[in-house]
Image (tube, rainbow, N blue to C red):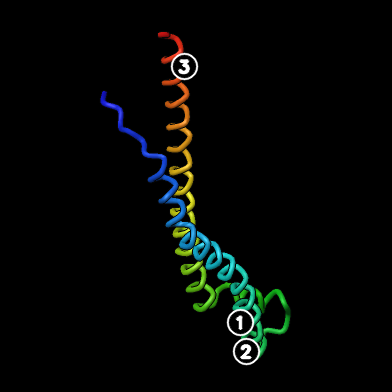
């Protein structure tokens, strides 16, 4: 099996290049999670106007509304984008750790042959 050379600088460059995208993905996820509460509140008001008197009935209507369901799909996409970036960054960090281990092993081999 041929070993693939690991370029730690490329991994660091990748992490730097993707840091802004990751930050934006995290911000989107948090925004979507918080905005979900606003949609629920708005939909509960609509439900109240439709004659649903109790909070439980209003909440049920809010959660079953098309607007809330659409928002959940958008939240799903935001979380997926964030997680993809997060795991790409974790993989880049792992590459650096593998390179570090390989370098340490090479140094140890060099000392053993002297």
Residue 18 lies, with reference to residue 64, above or below; the image says: above
Q: Residues within 10 Å of mark 3 (few under 14, many from 20)?
A: few
49 vs 92, left or right, is: right
Disc 1/disc 2 C-alpha distance (Å):
10 Å
Quarter assignment of residue 18: bottom left
Look at the image and tell me whether residue 61 can be seen. no
Q: How many marks?
A: 3
Residue denoted by label 3: 108
Quarter assignment of residue 60: bottom right
> If you read the primary sequence from the N terminus, does the residue marked by circle 3 or circle 2 appear first?
2
> If you read the primary sequence from the N terminus, does the residue marked by circle 1 or circle 3 appear first?
1
The circle on residue 43 is 1
Q: Residue at x 72, y 84 (%)?
A: 53
Mark 1: secondary structure: helix
Q: Residue at x 65, y 91 (%)?
A: 49
Disc 3/disc 2 C-alpha distance (Å):
75 Å
> Which residue reaches farthest left?
2
Residue denoted by label 2: 50
Disc 1/disc 3 C-alpha distance (Å):
65 Å
The quadrant in which the C terminus is found is: top left
Between 17 and 85, the residue placed more toward the observer is 17
Mark 3 or 2, which is nearer the eye?
A: 3
> Which residue reaches farthest right?
54
Q: Residue at x 51, y 68 (%)?
A: 72
Residue 112, horizontal then vertical, whole percent = 44, 9
> If you read the primary sequence from the N terminus, does the residue marked by circle 1 or circle 2 appear first?
1
Residue 97, horizontal then vertical, whole percent = 48, 34
Residue 7 lies, with reference to residue 33, above or below; the image says: above
Mark 1 or 3, which is nearer the eye?
A: 3
């Amino acid at each position: 099996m041929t070993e693939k050379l690991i370029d730690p600088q490329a991994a660091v460059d990748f992490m730097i290049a993707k840091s802004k995208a990751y930050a934006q993905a995290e911000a989107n996820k948090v925004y979507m999670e918080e905005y979900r509460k606003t949609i629920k509140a708005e939909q509960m008001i609509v439900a109240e106007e439709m004659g649903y008197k109790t909070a439980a009935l209003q909440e049920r209507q809010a959660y079953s509304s098309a607007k809330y369901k659409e928002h959940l799909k958008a939240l799903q996409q935001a979380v997926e984008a964030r997680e993809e970036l997060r795991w790409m960054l974790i993989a880049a960090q792992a590459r650096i750790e593998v390179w570090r281990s390989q370098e340490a092993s090479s140094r140890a081999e060099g000392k053993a042959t002297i």
